Amino acid sequence: MNGKPWMSNTILLCLLLSFSLPAMAEMDFNLLEMSNQLDGVDKQDFQSAIDKANACIRARNFSCAESEIAKAAKAANSGPDKKALLAGRNGLTKEKQALANEIRRAEEERQAQIRRDQEEKQAQRKSDEEREAREWREKRDAQDAEDRQATSNAWADLGRQIQQQGAEIGATMDTINRQKAAAINESNRVLAAQAAERERARAEKAEQEAERHRDAERDRTARANAQRAADTRLAQENSRIRQQEQERQDKQARLQEQAQKQEQDREKEQTRKQEQIRKKAEEERSKQAELQAKKQAAAQYLQNVATGTRLVAINCFGKYQVTGTRPKIKPEVVGCVDVTFRAYCPGNGQYYSEGIAKNFIGMDAGCFGDTYDINPKPACKADQVRIEVVEANTCAH
């Protein structure tokens, strides 16, 4: 090619850069604007989910709160969003604990009331037993006093009889003397009879006293047995209550442990799903970044190929054809390259022929090398034809 082709290529490169850089800047701006719009939508979804979750927590609708927190977790992108999400989760945990504490306090109050009722019943039963024992002692003391008075009266009557008989004996001394033997015998008989009567009365009184003592002993034994039976029943009832309380506490502990395990499982599952979502999003971003990088690398590679390609026109058996070389750029990002070119005569650039050097390799071997037709054929000589590289693209298959 005649003239200074490097100057034409430099001018062409400047023109390409002036066209491509604004387009790329506008594309980046549009992508940034779309990203900001998507972030705004995610922010609105996140705040809405957090507000609903807080409302559900205040209403103690835990399933609703967990669902909204899960929605918020999907839209949490920034540091403040994650802090707000953590605060929502902490609020849910605290509200669950507060409800559990209220249930526990209500149960403790119910158990305390049961114990107070039992203590009142036991105190009333003890008061009744003490009153019955006091009444029995008072009855026994009254009976003993009555028995002592009866014995005293009997001895007083006997003394009066003896005194009366002595007076009669003194008044009728003569009769007594005469009838001394008979009187003494009679007196002895009477005295013996009276002694026998006193002995009988004493024995009967002793038997009655012994019977009272036996009755009292039987009553004390019966009361002691009843007390022991009552104590046994009370101990058994207390043992049963303690066993029921222990069983209730064990059951509550199991339920609480089960609830905690279920909560931990839900949190683990939620964390696992969030991690999967995060990894999937990360992989998608990585793929998009890789794809974008590949596109940018391919675009840069094609631009470098277009910049470094050198084309000339030659006359091959009466036909004008294009041949030339392309730069050897490593790594070879695009395997197959089509080069679009324009051919025109000097001073007549508005009239040009345009063609595509398909699968351009850049083997410059004259008419027997890598050549491409110029249609229509320019009016000037082949060595005067100017060839401009318009662009390089991936081969269209």
Image (tube, grey):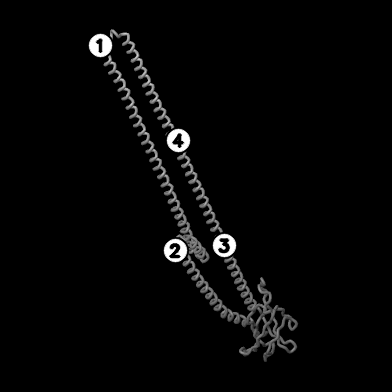
Q: How far apart are the two marked residues, 4 and 3, measured between alpha carbons?
A: 66 Å
Residue 89 location, x and y as percent?
48, 59
- Seen from the viewer's position, the closer of residues 67 and 312 is 67
Q: Is residue 82 visible?
A: no
Q: Residues within 10 Å of mark 4 (few under 14, many from 20)?
A: few
Q: Which residue is mark 1?
A: 172
Task: Tell me which corner region of the image, top left, top right, bottom left or bottom right, holds residue 192.
Answer: top left
- CB under 8 Å between callouts 1 and 2? no
Q: How far apart are the two marked residues, 4 and 2, measured between alpha carbons?
A: 60 Å
- Seen from the viewer's position, the closer of residues 128 and 193 is 193
- CB under 8 Å between callouts 4 and 1? no
The three-letter code of the residue at mark 4 reads Arg
Ranked by sequence position, the earlier of labels 4 and 2 is 2
- Seen from the viewer's position, the closer of residues 105 and 186 is 186
The three-letter code of the residue at mark 2 reads Ala
Foreground tag (1 vs 2): 1
Foreground tag (4 vs 3): 4
Identify the residue at horizontal 51%, vertical 65% (top origin): 71
- CB under 8 Å between callouts 4 and 3? no
Q: Residues within 10 Å of mark 2 (few under 14, many from 20)?
A: some
Foreground tag (2 vs 3): 2
The three-letter code of the residue at mark 1 reads Thr
Foreground tag (1 vs 3): 1
> Tag 3's secondary structure?
helix
Q: Which residue is mark 3?
A: 273
The three-letter code of the residue at mark 3 reads Lys
Q: Which residue is mark 4?
A: 228
Q: How far apart are the two marked residues, 1 and 3, measured between alpha carbons?
A: 135 Å
Q: How far apart are the two marked residues, 1 and 2, measured between alpha carbons?
A: 125 Å
Task: Tell me which corner region of the image, top left, top right, bottom left or bottom right, holds residue 280.
Answer: bottom right
> Tag 2's secondary structure?
helix
